[in-house]
Amino acid sequence: MNNILLLGGTGFLGKPLLQKLETKNSVKIMIHNSNLQTSAKKFKGNILIQKSFSKEIRNNETVINLLGQMSADENGFINSNIIGGLNLLNSCIKKKIKRVILISSINVYGENLERPSKETDRLCPKTTYAGVKMITEQMYKAFAENHGINITILRVAGIFGPGNKDGFLTKIIQSIKNKNITPVCYNNGEQQRDILYIDDVVDCILNVVNSQHDGFHVFNISSGKRHSINELISMIEKISKTKISAKYSSEIPDEKCIWADNTKAKKFLKFNPKVGIEAGLEYTVNQFLN
């Protein structure tokens, strides 16, 4: 049994991860303002206020940080990643932490049209989101090297599945029923993304929790494949038997293509995505329609 401190357990990824973790581990979860129903021990805290959570960190504990994901509040997003990250790392220095697991993003690689990005590739973020994630990763790496904290960074592809309220796939699926929602397809729908079903991401994090990797490590948690927005729309139209009314734009506001090589995660984390994109989309769409 592992002692787990989960930061960010109320979101799209956090909820199913918490459900799996609490069955076989001693889990404590930091909440800000939530009526979350769980058997895990809950405490109120704020990643931006170090003293609100530092005393809750236990020796020989694995800390999983899901905070600092995409947000419309840019300042809040930056603060939760950088200031929050510093608060967490400084708190961990004082305790004998088993490991910190940080959820990052394959967006840190930036544009990649030729081949899937590898962990050893130079990072070249194109957006504020990706840039902040890169800076956050570098901060965690520095603390691992200078203070001996065991840190594993998971660069996760785009996550999809039932219950997701954000992202372009969600808008496409919502537009099936709500004709007032018109998804915008940039680069005329030719932008390509690497996406992964939610269950496969949760299972991978569980594998990391149950593995032993001392020092600093980075893994791509991805499908290793890329799909254009047009391809995804076609799949959803076929599943739902509904024509999607999308708006096409030649504008390219961010990366044309993002995808990542998952060979390292397969080798060292026993990562093996089980849900293909067609099956994942079918389940997601049917759950929404029903």
Image: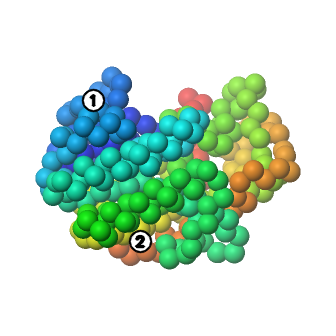
For residue 31, side relative to residue 125 (left or right) = left
* Label located before the other in sequence (1 or 2): 1
Tag count: 2
Q: Residues within 10 Å of mark 2 (few under 14, many from 20)?
A: some
Residue at image position (61%, 50%) is 128
For residue 132, side relative to residue 253 (left or right) = left
Residue at image position (29%, 40%) is 50
Q: CA distance from mark 1 to mark 2?
A: 36 Å
Question: Residue 14 lies in what quarter of the image?
Answer: top left
Q: Is residue 148 above or below residue 174?
A: below
For residue 111, side relative to residue 86 (left or right) = right
Q: Nearer the viewer, residue 149 or 209?
A: 149
Image location (x, y in percent) of residue 69: 49, 45
Q: Nearer the viewer, residue 136 or 26?
A: 136
For mark 2, what is the residue? 266
For mark 1, what is the residue? 44
- Quarter of the C terminus within the rendering: top right
Is any atom of residue 280 visible in this view? Answer: no
Q: Label 1's element?
A: strand
Residue at image position (31%, 48%) is 88
Q: Amino acid at mark 1?
A: Lys
Q: Amino acid at mark 2?
A: Lys
Image location (x, y in percent) of residue 222: 51, 62
Q: Label 2's element?
A: helix
Question: Residue 237 lies in what quarter of the image?
Answer: top right
Image location (x, y in percent) of residue 152: 35, 63
Look at the numbered discs 1 and 2 and tell me whether their residues touch, using CB distance below 8 Å: no
Give the label on residue 228, or none.
Answer: none
Q: Residues within 10 Å of mark 1 (few under 14, many from 20)?
A: few
